[in-house]
Image (cartoon, rainbow, N blue to C red):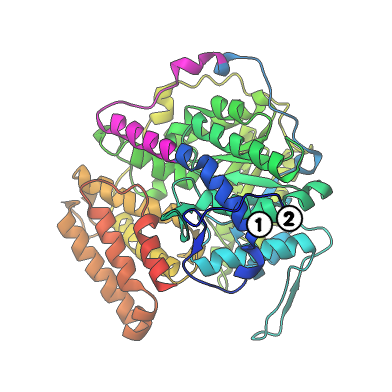
Amino acid sequence: MSLDLATPSTATRPVFLRVVRGQDRVLTPDATAFIAELQARFGSKLHALMVARQRRQERYDDGRLPDYLEETVTIRRGIWSAARVPDVLADRRVEITGPVDRKMMINALNSGAKVFMADFEDATSPSFTNIIAGHVNMLDYRDGTLELDDAETGKSYRVGDTPAVMIVRPRGLHLEEANMMIGGYAVSAALFDFGLNIFHNGRALAATGRGPFYYLPKLEGHREARFWNEVFVFAQDRLGIPQGTIKATVLIETLPAAFEMDEIVWELKDHIAGLNSGRWDYIFSYIKSLRNHSAYVLPDRAQVTMDRAFLATYAARVVKVCHRRGIHAMGGMAAQIPVKNDPAANEAAFAKVRADKLREVGMGFDGTWVAHPDLVAVAQEVFDAEMPGPNQIRKPRQEWRIEPAMLLKPTEGTITEAGVRTNVSVAIEYLAQWLSGRGAVPIHNLMEDAATAEISRAQIWQWIRHSATVGLTAGGERTMSREWLAELVQEEIVSILDRIGPNAFHRGRYASAARIFQEAASAEVLPDFITLPAYDVLNALD
């Protein structure tokens, strides 16, 4: 593709800090110039939005609680609908998510799911090598050449005749791509991922009616939705794609966004296809937003379930808002994955997935997420039985009256030593894998990604901050403290060394992972995202 793009000055010309395989295919002069134009047009707006996030959190820290906005009451109460969802997205009953790894992409596209969310964010470790390889895979998907011959196993992977529709999730607005700099500053990772994808693939996907489609992560309110809408309008105009072709599904995975669902849909009404209940990031955001409020301390992660308290209300509001506005309400991810060589444990995992999906379809959700190809049939069976049509959009849920306090009600339960140790173990193991280049990691028969690692470290921080009482396995109680956390981290390091040995320990980045986790969990102020300090380490190791 060639565009009439202005040549940037020497001072604003993009600079790349490393060279990786495939870079010449995706970072072409025109593509690079397009990203630079996006950064120039929208970079200052994005910075202002990030400052606004900080100001909002300061108000929460000072004692304010999230609430519906007074200035947008007419939007919430108004009778209006979003633009029509295209036919290719009418049936989204099962979506599979995963990283932009080549083999996993092919397997996901062939899984039988209606949609595959190709994830540049939480399920991908964002080394420059991984990110560029992901964008190369997008080019091959566009050209029908996405295939793989595995020399080690002798297996071949090819995309079948009826693949899932692909929806791409770029990285969040808070992230940077440190390996591309303009004017001495790193570019926005969100604009980098979106820009490369839409530039190279947008027109071809539009011509076939199978895109371009996006998932938008970690929005915190309608002004951020407005930002994305402006980016969409500009990109479509610049690339000669008809306005309204882009369709986006917004992940409602932050507490502030739960209070602005109608407003988010309104800002994106020409481009929105649905909202998704991103449950794991939502739990993390709940902890982070209410971090200074002792009345909102949560119990063990395993006790924070979708059928109770703030999560049940949040899920109900997603369905209510979506169906009122004529778009899809998408359910969240069940973390269970198949358990090999243990039929009883495997069936127990499948039963949990079935129960989760039965709850979602009964609430009115139009589709759901799974993390493994073997779970597609499990989820589809539930939705096929309970949802004969392509979706449930025409079934309103206006009888649900949802007050702000209902969206804030904490889950009741206990904090246990087992829960504390699980959080320490999961966070360190996941971060080590992430630093080694893997973003979606099976741990304890659950698929963990950046969101679940964030919950683990945020819960430890919250329990330390509020001196939570922890029930000990051997009986009695202990107050959660930085000193005890240090003991637990040391014990976990010893356990890992005993299991894999010192050489594998160091090759596996466990020392860096333990340090990053402990510093984040014991900090005076809860760091916004653990992946920010981890990214600096990852980039140095790449």
Residue topped by disc 2: 2
Q: Position of residue 298 (x, y in %)?
A: 33, 41
Residue extending furthest toward the left: 483
Label 1 vs label 2: CA separation? 6 Å
Q: Residue at x 38, y 49 (%)?
A: 301
Kindly tell me whether residue 110 is visible in this rendering: no
Q: Amino acid at mark 1?
A: Asp
Residue 30 got which mark? Answer: 1
Residue 402, image x, y percentages: 49, 22
User: Hey, what amino acid is under mark 2?
Assistant: Ser
Q: Is residue 261 above or below residue 9?
A: above
Q: Is residue 450 above or below residue 262?
A: below
- Seen from the viewer's position, the closer of residues 48 and 79 is 48
Q: Is residue 66 magenta?
A: yes
Numbered label attached to residue 370: none
Residue 490 visible (yes or no): yes
Residue drawn at the location 35% of the way across and 79% of the way down: 505
Where does the magenta region start and end? 47-74
Name the foreground residue: 73 vs 30.
30
Give percent across and percent down for residue 96: 65, 54
Q: Residue at x 58, y 65 (%)?
A: 132
Magenta region, main secondary structure: helix
* Nearer to us in this view, 286 or 191: 191
User: Do tag 1 and tag 2 residues touch (Cβ < 8 Å)?
Assistant: yes
**Element assignment for label 2:** loop
Q: In what quadrant of the picture does the N terminus appear?
A: bottom right
